[in-house]
Image: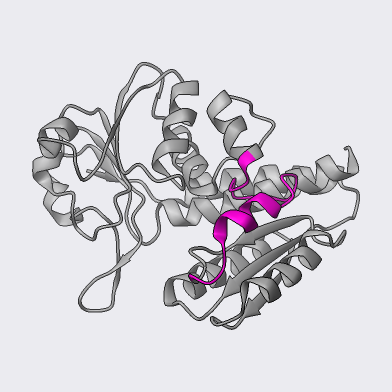
Amino acid sequence: MRILKGADASAAIKIQVAEGLERLKGKVPKLGIIRVGERADDKSYERGAVKRMESFGLRVQSYVYPEKISHEDFEKEFRTINEDPDVAGILLLRPLPGQISEKQIENMIDPAKDLDGISPANIAKVFAGDSTGFAPCTAEAVVEMLKAAGISISGKRITIVGRSMVVGRPLSMLLLQENATVTICHTRTRELAGACRSAEILVAAAGKAGMIDQSFVGKDAVVIDVGINVDEKGRLCGDVDFDSITEIASMATPVPGGVGVVTTAVLAKHLVRAAGLAQKV
């Protein structure tokens, strides 16, 4: 089985980012990362995003707020960042604490700065097949990984396990635009393993550690693991029981080192694109 690491796709995107920076003629855009609280997964993603932005020659600033901040206070802070002309793009780490209305914040974010596709305007564009919006970074990263690996998408039977608005649903739209035949499965899908075995490309985005084992994977299938979980030993792991599929799958992505690497690269690409649109270059 070939292991599909994220490094190749990330390197290709880095070239695109460098070309975008040249068009900006010395104006280096800034990403604003907004985090509420001290969730370990949020902090881990933030560290990775900061490292990636800096390695791509981009600016980044983290805005961190206490977990118990009121909705009113957070909304005020968010509005200030949203309206700051020096902030070219925003990454809001979610979920937010219960006292903050996530929907209200999603409706507030400037679609032109919404790099992770959470605003209603960008979501609508993804579902309408309008490429002028920003798709969620993780969903776009899956497509980038398949293309970087030379895997044809057109006409392929692709099954996605997971129906979230972060990955499953927007990814299905991106894959349909590439002429794939897409099936979305979830926890209430009957005979889930059987439904997955018919896929030529299987995308695991269920958010449950080790859920996808050899019984879900068809012979020579490509397996893309989007899951980010922590196992009982405190180690980072995906939704796929990686060791169990090595004799069945033709290719598979590892966790860590797979889709997550490409997700932050896509974020960088979105940032440069946002800055270019703002400067009309």
Query: Quarter-wise, where is residue 53 in the image?
Result: bottom right
Question: What segment carries the magenta color?
Answer: 98-120
At 70% from the left and 67% from the top, the residue drawn is 75
Using the image as rendered, state which of residue 35 and residue 276 is in the foreground.
Answer: 35
Q: Is residue 100 left or right of residue 26?
A: left
Residue 199 placement (x, y as % from top left) = 22, 28
Is residue 219 shown to the viewer in this render? Answer: no
Query: Quarter-wise, where is residue 223 in the image?
Result: top left
Specify the quadrant that holds the N terminus.
Answer: top left
Answer above or below: position of 49 versus 273. Answer: below
Query: Quarter-wise, where is residue 159 in the image?
Result: top left
Answer above or below: position of 277 versus 41. Answer: above
Q: Is residue 46 left or right of residue 77?
A: left
Using the image as rendered, state which of residue 167 and residue 272 is in the foreground.
Answer: 167
Is residue 154 shown to the viewer in this render? Answer: yes
Residue 19 placement (x, y as % from top left) = 76, 43
At 59% from the left and 72% from the top, the residue drawn is 35
Residue 257 placement (x, y as % from top left) = 40, 59
Whether 202 is among the magenta residues is no
Answer above or below: position of 111 versus 39. Answer: above
Whether 119 is among the magenta residues is yes
Residue 227 placement (x, y as % from top left) = 33, 55
At 39% from the left and 46% from the top, the residue drawn is 164
Prevailing SS of the magenta stretch? loop
